[in-house]
């Protein structure tokens, strides 16, 4: 057993631009979140300081043992409806990855879980569900992440795909509160926005939209009459940029795509999407400008 209930729990979430560290009263549920610290990704000095603050007494191994969730830009999180008659075909899942999801199976470490509760998908069960989530990270990215964490004095006792853990946490929360309202979840990145629709029954829909922060830079340049894209980028990614007036213009294309996804879901299910949960991945200049404590619900989907 890796953890004892008497031991403190440590959790880490790492994206391309920031790192969140948390200490809990126990390594296993029930637990209380005692402290959370955020620091910019790639800043080893800030991360080392955060580790010392969370665990003042250094572990005998020299490493902070933590459950680590990563959110790489090349991640795969897609809902797929399987064809039951093809489940016994040896190459069926690889065909889905290569032809439907457009990734190279040999380069990815992938997992298939049920879309309703996140349990491991078992094709041998007669009642196996047709709706599943494919999760994946480039194998090279996993090696890179693990090596980087060890260099920073963090031993990953478990490595998770942060996006799936986050979706599971939301599903668990909706079920716990008895909230049956479909919720739109957005992970906005530089080049792509991952959109999901979740309910208390699981992940209902997923869709990657090829628009993110970078696609908004030309609009900033045009609206403000700036001479070059670099000036627009610096202004847009600064902490002083005011989204109040330009927000509708900058998000118009993204909103149009989201309206299409939401409309399709609502026609299919007869349910209206009534809530929004946005998880943004800020650019480096924004992420490095802050180091703050936040309150988060750290939950597992299982």
Image: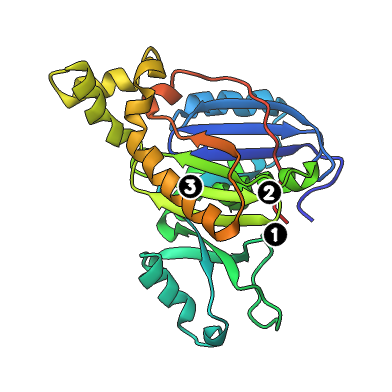
Marks 1 and 2 in Cβ contact (< 8 Å): yes
Q: For the point 48% across and 76% down, which residue is it?
A: 93
Which image quadrant for residue 91? bottom left
1 or 2: tag closer to the N-terminus: 1
CA distance for labels 2 and 3? 15 Å
- State the residue position of label 2: 171
Q: For the point 22% across and 30% down, which residue is it?
A: 218
Q: Is 178 in front, or is 151?
A: 178
Residue 160 % position (x, y): 59, 52
CA distance for labels 3 and 1? 19 Å
Q: Is residue 238 above or below residue 147?
A: above
- State the residue position of label 3: 195
- State the residue position of label 1: 117
Q: Is residue 136 above or below residue 224?
A: below
2 or 3: tag closer to the N-terminus: 2
Residue 102 % position (x, y): 36, 65
């Amino acid at each position: 057993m890796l953890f004892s209930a008497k031991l403190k729990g440590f959790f880490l979430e790492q994206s391309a631009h920031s790192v969140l560290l948390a200490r809990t009263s126990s390594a296993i549920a029930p637990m209380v979140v005692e402290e959370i610290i955020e620091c910019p990704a790639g800043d080893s000095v800030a991360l080392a300081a955060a580790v010392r603050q969370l665990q003042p007494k250094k572990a005998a191994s020299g490493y902070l043992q933590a459950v680590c969730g990563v959110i790489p830009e090349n991640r795969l999180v897609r809902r797929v409806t399987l064809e039951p008659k093809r489940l016994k075909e040896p190459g069926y899942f690889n065909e889905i990855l290569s032809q439907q999801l457009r990734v190279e199976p040999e380069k990815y470490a992938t997992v298939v879980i049920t879309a309703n509760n996140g349990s491991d998908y078992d094709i041998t069960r007669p009642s196996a569900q047709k709706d599943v989530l494919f999760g994946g990270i480039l194998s090279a990215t996993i090696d890179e992440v693990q090596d980087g964490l060890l260099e920073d004095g963090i031993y990953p006792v478990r490595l998770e795909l942060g996006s799936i853990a986050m979706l599971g946490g939301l599903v668990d929360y909706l079920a716990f509160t008895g909230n049956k309202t479909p919720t739109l979840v957005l992970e906005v990145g530089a080049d792509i926005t991952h959109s999901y629709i979740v309910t208390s029954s699981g992940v209902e829909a997923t869709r990657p939209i090829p628009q993110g922060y970078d696609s908004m830079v030309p609009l900033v340049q045009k609206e403000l009459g700036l001479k070059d894209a670099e000036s627009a980028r610096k202004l847009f990614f600064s902490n002083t940029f005011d989204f109040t007036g330009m927000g509708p213009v900058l998000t118009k294309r993204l909103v149009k795509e989201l309206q299409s996804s939401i409309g399709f879901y609502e026609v299919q299910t007869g349910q209206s999407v009534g809530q929004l949960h946005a998880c943004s991945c800020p650019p480096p200049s924004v992420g490095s400008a802050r180091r703050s404590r936040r309150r988060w619900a750290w939950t597992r989907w299982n």
